[in-house]
Amino acid sequence: MSWVQEGEMTRASLGPQLPEVAEEEEEGCRGPRLRRRVQFLLPPVTIQEPPPQQEEKAFHQSVEHLLGATLEGNFEGLFAADGWEDLLEEKSVRKLRVRGGQGQARGPQPGQEVTVKLLGALQDQSLVEKDPRLTFVLGQGEAVQALDLAVLSMRPGEVALILTRPAYAYGRLGRQPDIPAEAPLLYQVTLLQVRESPDLALLAAPQRLGLADRAREQGRFHFERQDYQLALRSYQRALRLLPSSPAAADGPQDQEVEEQEVELRQLRLKCLTSCAAAQLKLGRREAALDFCHEAERLEPDDAQALYWKGKLLAELGQDQAAAKLLKRALQLEPTAKAIHAELSRMARRQRGQPEPGGDVPGGPLSHSPAGPDQARTSLSPQNPVAAACVPDEGVACAAAGKAAAVSGLSALRQPQLSLSVAPHLSFP
């Protein structure tokens, strides 16, 4: 504890000081000579160390007590223990009420916005989730599934422990760097507030753009985990959240309108291409093609949109049209590995060779170096797909068979969110 006492002020405690100012009376001026020292006196200030985190301490003690009561001494024993409420039949998500809610207040419903206080721990008792006010909309994929299920069963003011299998938390991929793959989690959840979702018509354009971008981030999170249905739902929600035009909501100045129009257009384009990718992964080629057409109408020269449409046409067996689109995309992004890889995949398929798979939707393209020392593949001029693999700029497709690494989940991880947001996923 440090004190700053009145009357004992120093230059260091007051921060930067103004220099002494001497104003000499000039000839013809009637003002007096001034040489004044100004000193500001502040009241005593006490700087205290933050108090111990009693709530975290109590949570750790609860975890120790629960684990100590099982023979196994781990979460597996808790999944079989008595006294828990099973939120799913297979005991994958379990709830233990710590404190009841307020009176007979109605519980939250899907589509409502809730705010919870959250703590979460791994089996080794390390704290990996902490948020004093986490806000999300129920049933929209904005939080891990275990939290969605648990909060639906709670009342305002209720405190509960939630035990979940990995499938309803962070699954086979985990959340780098703190949550390993296939890790069960134990949460302590306090339901603080339940309210209706905000009326979109009353929100300003920047707010709606922020909500839409957040929904798209959540879609990428689900896409990376190969939960394409949830990913598609998030992408479509992002499209619904976008305003028709920025000026319609709050009427800013012309420059602001122009900047927001650019942001709106880019975000809508990303959502459309992401919807196309998710529909393609779900095997809905016609629906995917509709999104591709809409994206192409919005921006005819977007490499991302051209890539996904070309990939879709290739899967439909329309290699000539696919190669044309992919070559256009490659001219826009000459070092994009994904475009090289798709053209190479088409060439291998025509030659009857096996195809590697796996890609993800995204925004910025991953690029490969295109130096003169790159080894070039043997391209037959009779093969239109192989010929399209080399753009007009002369970029070789030696690295076409390689998939670009997907950015790590921790790149844009936000610790205050229970649903860690995936980074802007790149082309494979």
Image (spheres, helix red, strand yellow):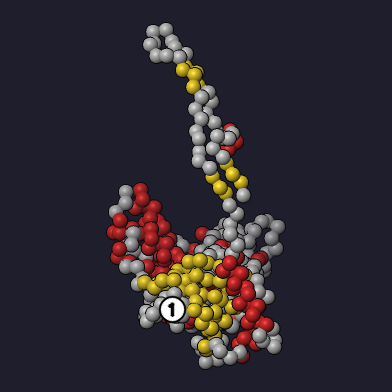
Q: Image height check: is 92 above or below 310?
A: below
Judging depth in this view, the residue of 101 and 16 nearest the camera is 101
Judging depth in this view, the residue of 248 and 285 nearest the camera is 248
Residue kind at label 1, given as amino acid type: Gly
Residue at mark 1: 101
Q: In this view, does 78 lie to the left or right of 110?
A: right
The total number of labels drawn is 1
User: Which type of secondary structure does the marked residue at label 1 adopt?
Assistant: loop
Residue at 43%, 78% in the rendered image: 101
Q: Is residue 25 visible?
A: yes
Q: In this view, does 129 lie to the left or right of 294?
A: right
Residue 37 percent location from the top left of the image: 51, 24
Q: Can residue 366 be seen in this view?
A: no
Residue at 36%, 72% in the rendered image: 195
Q: Residues within 10 Å of mark 1 (few under 14, many from 20)?
A: many
Judging depth in this view, the residue of 164 and 307 nearest the camera is 164
Residue 188 percent location from the top left of the image: 54, 75
Q: In this view, does 86 lie to the left or right of 368?
A: left
Toward which corner of the image does residue 17 lie, by quadrant?
A: top right
Residue at 46%, 62% in the rendered image: 302
Residue found at the very far top of the displayed protein: 27
Judging depth in this view, the residue of 185 and 216 nearest the camera is 185
Q: Image height check: is 303 above or below 28?
A: below
Quarter placement of the C terminus: bottom right
Residue 290 percent location from the top left of the image: 40, 75
